[in-house]
Image (cartoon, coloured by chain):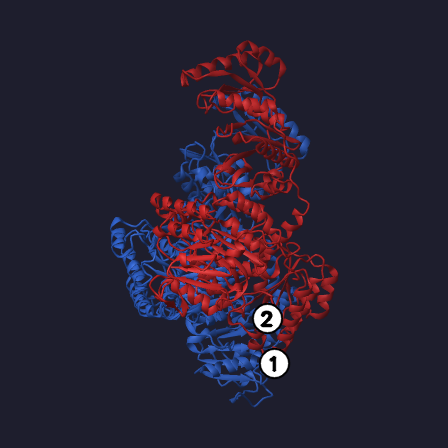
Chain colours: A red, B blue
């Protein structure tokens, strides 16, 4: 686990503010129940070495520190001001602070955007005053911040250990919860905490960059109800996750949760599934249960990554080896296949009844010699088929359960495990059923940086996060974005024409755009008068054809009777034309009908859907899934932010639960995955090249064993861009 | 939570054995590392009041107790003997013990069935000796047992509190793990523990009955690697779960886990999804993560059940209210819709900024008065839309976080919550972020029987288990099995004919069986010669027809060219006949071809599948799912043990992830669910009436908005039954 954090130059403007050399407390108080008192207690108790300027016109001294009667009385510029006064006073105070050259403020008051339009107005005044005065704003509606390595403890939390977890949380209770868990755990500490509150100025992306640059933070951990600027966040996360693990718990995984979140911080929470996909795309470790945040942050902080997903399990009990196997498989990890050499080496030190097939069950071999478990771990760690080592069972409890004189063996075993963990790039993770009562060998492991978990489930979440991160880093080393697409003059003119005519693109125009940029679109003919059908019948020969009305006024063509299928020969085409015209006129007498689109009926294949939308938080997002029930009922779709790398496109296909259908289920041939990946990359390129494109829907694309055909295309234009 | 356990008459033969008045220890030892010594320590230390007979020919006294030189020297019959000697000695010892009138033995040794054929032979000798002598056998290959209320602590575990959780576990480490968690938790105790080991004689079903009858057990908890007699277990679980909660963790949820389990106890682990469905069918609370076993067992033991799934959340922090909302929805629980009256009552005591919509966020109202949270809980508990009350946040920590003098208010609040929990049928469950450090108010709640959890996730699992159990009990009050089906003489003759001819049923015979017992089968005609096709063409008029070969020798009809579809008119039928005969002869020249089956092409509808198999562990099991990819790729199927109640059949349909397809997705009409339920019940009745039926496959059945049609049927006969 020799992962030395790279030293990163400080570019974020937040370093001065979050590690300030002087602090003013606006609304400092002598009342012990007030935040303006508690913050001072926190600073003084922790031994903050910078200047403290309590501002209070009424008191002379607070906690022995001389107060200032006003902001005006500040002796000079200070780095950070904590504002403890009510909401209505905040814009004026920030304006004053700005004039005194204060770099940043923490605004505790609530009563802003989260309460409705009046509050939103006040929040805008806060922002205006801050911009005017060059002051950065943390909050408002924040629980505050601390930076323990600089002894800035504005929350006055007792018993929080300085450590390596940086935490940004829109829930103050979640911070408290982690702090109490850490207190109980005994080996976890924190670097910087900030409650971003309403993020009126500084947002998650800014905090993440700060944590990324902060030399005391080995893992950036975020509890997010809603992002303000998702695109910037993704950019920051992509850069920071290359340096250190980024862990995100995103609330609002359900409709109920989204409603609750929005009444809490006024946050706009988009689709959870989409958010998770986009976060993973940029290397974030997404945690889905709140009780896994601390275990995963601790494990990633200590161990950073694993070379892969092949886990070797060493256990001293069959039952828990079984549970570990189940959980590993469910988490997408593999039981490493041990080499014959490894098995032989294990056999040489274990009882004959031991199981040498991973999970290795020592079956009593360690009962009189617990250090034997460490030997087994060393052996499997040397196997090149193994990416991480997981000890499962009662290690740490041998002296309690069997005989007191086993303590020596346990302590020796712990030292060997620590040694192994230090010298190997393969993470060593320990689950012990004795972890809740913290016996000496486990305390020793833990304090030396080998994480010890109280449940198999937590340990497996950590192993999964380590493996996913390792694979992400490795695969992104040479992942590149495809070259940008140059927009074509014809197509730009086509967009302009559509805008001038007050409509979106016709289907044939959408298809022309796709075709221009190399996407396989089914053959088609636009027919403007029935006499042209002769030529069409000849051109497509004997194939069965489909006919669809072309009209900007008819959006639901089937409902209007504007679609006819399986047409053979000129007579059928003429008759279909007549029927379509009649039905569509009946449907909408004023519809502007430009003709019909004729196209050969698609060959049978697998229907997939490609969609693009511009998300208000995350910007352009591409969606891919199988057609029909898979999208509509099972919601089995993958999302990626545009632009996509080739890896992104490949992983979209692999992520689907229904990927087996693409791989050739029920005796069908596998579809051409390379062609689909190419399609996704080309769509991504088109969207990047044409800001005029607002939404795109290819539904369906028919995927074949040799290529694909886009048989329907809909493009909504972005009037704002024209 | 006034749930008094009913007193149940003791019918299980295990009471004398698991609560023995006298115990012999065969292989008692003076060596402190041996089980034969530890067991004596456990008995003596805990103050066991019955007679202890250590048997050891070499020592005179062990731990001050006079030893006996041999089994022969036992003064008279004893209830239980603990056998600590090696595997090979066990059959002889049991024979001797049987002659002395010993009722039961615990066999610790391993080296039996789990090691292979030699061990299995030895295990059979154990069983033979036991049957011969009238001795019941616990194990072999067991970790042992304890009964703390009778001070029988054969495992010599220190610091285990007597309590209300009965635990049967095929993993000794899992027992240790729960005991250590309980020690740490401080408020959970155990009644009886048994390791069933290889279950050669006494199995899970027997232990469950014992726990069901045991007045000290309020919740029966099982860690299962494999059942021996699944049908008996289901029967026992159905009866016991009506009396008290039954919690099962079943290992082997993955292929990897199944392999690991089978090398551990030699257990045959069937399909996990099937096992879970069957356990839930009989009212078992299935736990899917090992770290949830103790929280769920504790919560169910204390609170037993909730009237339903509508949860009211009272919280003092928006972030955690959001997390709770997400987890509740994911667990299939609902946020109760509070009545206007309830909201008005809450508004009267809370700050104006409080959120009165469930989750209720008191938004600071309780900061100076934590007892207010209890008032809110009392108010929502009186709302008839609420089934359970969930407190989320920092209760218990107010005195730590805000001001020490809030402790009084916290203790008063705790007393009110205890009072509420005692008088209400609605369970009260508490999550507190201060739970890890056990402040006084939480200790008081816990010791008074209000469970306090360290994570929202655990608390929600408990609320889900309580709600599911309450709903199960309520709905099963008047759930009855449909009347038995009387087998028809014709159909019995048909089975006999097939057996005599050494074949399974022809498709038309299978359909005849279904039709005889009221199942809707598509119309059809069996055609034995081409001239009969005239009549068939007339009978089915203008409909398009399908033709399938009838031959016991051709199992894969399509592959053999034995299926023709979309046939219109006599000429098409004749030509199809000729082609089928030619193809099938080419496929298998010796095939015994009896003719063809002609049936109208099915109308379009939703394809479903009904299957029956006889599981080696659980007996006849019915499977239901949607056709095609749903079954084959998404494995979205439901299982129930036969016979099914109407409730079972309904819940099968409701359980499918793809139920939306049945409810009318994508503009289609909903299918006739009542007809499908009727179909499932009829299939269940047929399977019960005809033991000759071994496997059945209706694939597909086409479901319509008005009824259904079984269009294909395959029945494999059970030659053993004929």
Of A29 and B236, nearer the camera is: A29
Instruction: Please tell me the numbered disc located at residue A405.
Output: 1
Of B129 and A111, nearer the camera is: A111
Count neighbours of disc 1 (C-alpha within 10 A) and say few if under 14, some if 14 to 19, many if 20 or more. Answer: few
Residue A671 spot, x, y in % from top left: 63, 35
User: Can the viewer see residue B638?
Assistant: yes
Q: Quadrant of the N terminus of chain A?
A: bottom right
Q: Kindly identify the residue that appears in the image at 28 percent across and 60 percent down.
A: B375
Query: Vertically, is B500 above or below B68?
Result: above
Q: Say which chain tag 1 marks.
A: A
- Residue at the spot of label 2: A395
Q: Quadrant of residue A27?
A: bottom left
Residue A483 spot, x, y in % from top left: 66, 35
Image-based side of A451 in relation to B340, left or right: right
Name the N-terminal-most of marks 2 and 1. Answer: 2
Image-based side of B232 in relation to A364, left or right: left
Residue A590 spot, x, y in % from top left: 41, 16
Secondary structure type for disc 2: loop
């Amino acid at each position: 686990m020799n992962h030395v954090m790279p030293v990163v130059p400080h570019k974020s403007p937040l370093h001065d503010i979050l590690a300030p050399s002087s602090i003013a407390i606006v609304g400092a108080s002598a009342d012990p129940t007030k935040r303006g008192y508690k913050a001072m207690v926190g600073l003084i108790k922790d031994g903050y070495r910078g200047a403290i300027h309590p501002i209070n016109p009424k008191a002379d001294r607070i906690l022995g520190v001389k107060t200032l009667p006003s902001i005006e009385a500040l002796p000079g510029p200070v780095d950070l001001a904590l504002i403890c006064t009510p909401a209505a006073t905040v814009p004026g105070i920030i304006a004053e602070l700005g004039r005194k050259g204060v770099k940043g403020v923490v605004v505790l008051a609530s009563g802003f955007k989260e309460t409705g339009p009046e509050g939103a107005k006040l929040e805008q005044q806060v922002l205006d005053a801050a911009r005017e005065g060059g002051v950065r704003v943390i909050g408002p509606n924040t629980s505050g911040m601390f930076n323990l390595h600089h002894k800035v403890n504005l929350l006055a939390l007792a018993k929080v250990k300085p450590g390596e977890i940086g935490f940004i949380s829109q829930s103050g209770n979640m911070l408290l919860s982690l702090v109490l868990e850490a207190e109980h755990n005994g080996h976890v500490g924190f670097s910087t905490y900030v409650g971003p509150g309403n993020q009126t100025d500084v947002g998650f992306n800014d905090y993440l960059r700060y944590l990324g640059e902060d030399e005391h933070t080995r893992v950036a951990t975020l509890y997010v109800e809603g992002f303000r600027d998702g695109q910037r966040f993704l950019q920051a996360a992509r850069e920071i996750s290359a340096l250190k693990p980024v862990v995100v718990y995103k609330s609002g995984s359900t409709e109920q949760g989204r409603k609750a979140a929005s009444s809490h911080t006024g946050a706009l929470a988009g689709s959870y599934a989409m958010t998770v996909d986009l976060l993973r795309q940029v290397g974030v470790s997404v945690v889905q249960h709140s009780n896994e945040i601390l275990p995963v942050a601790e494990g990633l902080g200590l161990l950073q990554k694993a070379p892969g997903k092949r886990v070797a399990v060493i256990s001293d009990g069959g039952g828990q080896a079984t549970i570990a196997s189940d959980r590993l498989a469910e988490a997408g990890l593999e039981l490493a296949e041990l080499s014959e050499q490894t098995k032989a080496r294990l056999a040489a030190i274990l009882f004959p009844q031991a199981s040498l097939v991973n999970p290795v069950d020592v079956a009593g071999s360690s009962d009189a010699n617990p250090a034997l478990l460490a030997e087994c771990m060393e052996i499997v760690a040397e196997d090149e088929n193994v990416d991480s080592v997981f000890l499962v069972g009662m290690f740490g409890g041998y002296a309690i359960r069997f005989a007191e004189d086993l303590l020596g063996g346990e302590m020796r075993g712990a030292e060997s495990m620590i040694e192994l963990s230090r010298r190997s790039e393969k993470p060593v993770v320990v689950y012990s059923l004795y972890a809740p009562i913290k016996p000496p060998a486990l305390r020793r492991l833990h304090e030396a940086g080998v994480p010890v978990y109280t449940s198999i489930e937590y340990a497996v979440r950590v192993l999964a996060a380590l493996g996913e991160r390792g694979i992400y880093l490795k695969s992104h080393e040479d992942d590149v974005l495809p070259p940008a697409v140059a927009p074509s003059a014809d197509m730009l003119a086509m967009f302009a024409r559509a805008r001038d005519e007050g409509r979106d693109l016709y289907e044939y125009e959408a298809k022309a755009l796709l075709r221009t940029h190399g996407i396989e679109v089914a053959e088609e003919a636009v027919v403007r008068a029935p006499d042209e059908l002769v030529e069409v019948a000849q051109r497509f020969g004997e194939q069965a054809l489909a006919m669809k009305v072309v009209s900007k006024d008819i959006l639901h063509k089937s409902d209007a009777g504007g679609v006819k299928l399986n047409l053979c020969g000129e007579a059928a085409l003429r008759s279909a034309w007549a029927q379509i015209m009649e039905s569509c006129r009946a449907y909408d007498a004023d519809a502007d009908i430009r003709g019909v689109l004729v196209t050969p009926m698609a060959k049978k294949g697998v229907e997939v859907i490609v969609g693009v939308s511009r998300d208000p938080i995350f910007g352009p997002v591409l969606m891919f899934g199988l057609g029909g029930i898979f999208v509509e009922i099972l919601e089995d779709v993958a999302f990626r932010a545009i632009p996509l790398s080739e890896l992104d496109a490949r992983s979209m296909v692999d992520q689907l639960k229904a990927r087996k259908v693409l791989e050739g289920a029920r005796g069908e041939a596998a579809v051409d995955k390379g062609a689909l990946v190419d399609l996704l990359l080309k769509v991504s390129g088109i969207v990047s090249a044409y800001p005029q494109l607002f939404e795109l829907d290819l539904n369906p694309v028919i995927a074949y064993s040799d290529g694909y055909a886009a048989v329907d295309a809909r493009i909504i234009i972005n009037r704002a861009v024209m």
